Image (cartoon, helix red, strand yellow):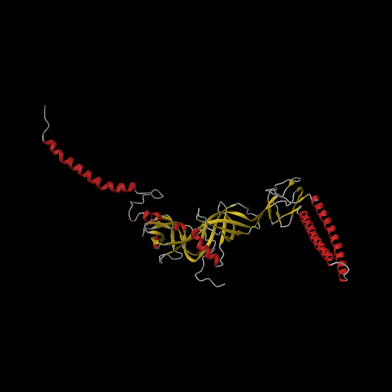
Amino acid sequence: MVSPAPNSSRRASPYWAMFWVALVVTLFWWYPSARDRWLAPKDIEGQSSGPPGPRSGATQRGTPVSVAKAKVLDIRVNVAALGNLAALNTAVVRAKVDGELRAIRFTEGQMVQAGAVLAEIDPRPYELALQQAQGQLARDQASLRNAQIDLQRYQDLLAKDAIARQQMETQQALVRQLEGTVQTDQAQVDNARLQLSFTRVTAPISGRLGLKQVELGSLVRASDPAGLVTITQTDPMALVFAVPDVHVPEIQRKLQSGKTLAVDAFDRDLKPVASGRVMAVDNAIDLTTGTLKLKAQFDNKAGLLFPNQFAQVRMQLDVLPQQLAVPIQAIQRGSLGTFVVKVGPQNAVKLVKVNVMGSDGDWQAISTEGDLKPDDTVVTDGADRLRDGSRVNVVNTVQPPLPAASPAPIPAKPAAS
């Protein structure tokens, strides 16, 4: 057997070492650039946009945000509450005399005026009572006239000393007695006539009729608790609601100075229902809820408001004139406190600390130390990812509707009217 030459393996070792060194160097140089090309984000056409870095597209475009403009507006300071609509007056129409219901002169749900005839009760028993009282009155009046004639005769005889004074004085007492009797009879006649008039049931107030509580031909009584029908005075309409007692001093100052507190009512879907003003304040705060009841008044000529209807209430307590305001979505809160994110030149942002005041609709009144001015751009969406100096990419500008008190931006010095 022939053994391999011992020097052949030693001659091959340097070549293998050089091969491995060259391979490692090649991979070390080639792999990072290939990795960056493979993992870099692709643009719309599928081409590589290059490795991320300070000049990448993401950094150049900035964080996508929505923005709005700061405005100078009149901001209403509102107090929100819940309430129920109520009739200004409610009356239960009851019969004042007992009897058979002979006629119903109304239609359920109709509007009536005060004094309108609603029903008629059988008047015959009351007509007879009136005739009886009138007969009694006529009889006693005749007796009175006869006594007065006798008294005149006795006075003439007394002047001639033909009768005793006692006889004349007795006749005078009889005349006074009969005069009292006639007065009583006259009162009975008037009462009988009044009872007869009660057989025609009339509306005590103007308003809307409810559903009838009796049927034609029924025997009605003055003591019936349900009465014949209910009338609610719905024009104007009242709204009763409660506000926290913290607002009581300001409410009292406004009312005592003669100012009007405007009130807006909304339905469950926050659609406007009516607008009015505060007309009365309760005389005590409810200790259970810590609230004070107020009553507002609304016009209801169209008849769209009904008693006991639920309403969400917004009472205008004050107006902050010419206030710098931003959309509520622009208000941010964090370790800095309350702030807004202002978009400056080259889309660089700055965090501006603000103090919030009253809000009106989608707008929040604020005060700053001059870092934010009217028409400055503020971020309304996407501010949570931003820091001072961050760059943004404005993708949407949303300007909320202006408050009702300010249909358009108000000039700094409005012209005097």
**Total labels drawn:** 0
Q: In the figure, is residue 296 to the left or right of 322?
A: right
Q: Residue 5 or 309: which is nearer the viewer?
A: 309
Q: Residue at x 56, y 63 (%)?
A: 261
Residue 399 visible in image: no
Q: Quadrant of the C terminus?
A: bottom right
The residue furthest bottom is: 416
Residue 135 location, quadrant: bottom right
Eyeballing the image, is 10 above or below 100? above
Eyeballing the image, is 51 above or below 371? above
Q: Quadrant of the N terminus?
A: top left
Residue 187 visible in image: yes
Whole-percent x, y for residue 119 in the image: 75, 51
Whole-percent x, y for residue 106 in the image: 73, 51
Q: In the figure, is residue 173 to the left or right of 51?
A: right
Whole-percent x, y for residue 110 in the image: 70, 52
Q: Residue at x 56, y 62 (%)?
A: 262
Q: In the figure, is residue 150 to the left or right of 312?
A: right
Residue 17 location, quadrant: top left
Q: Residue 221 or 281: which is nearer the viewer?
A: 221
Q: Residue 337 or 188: which is nearer the viewer?
A: 188
Q: In the figure, is residue 295 to the left or right of 41?
A: right
Whole-percent x, y for residue 188 in the image: 78, 56
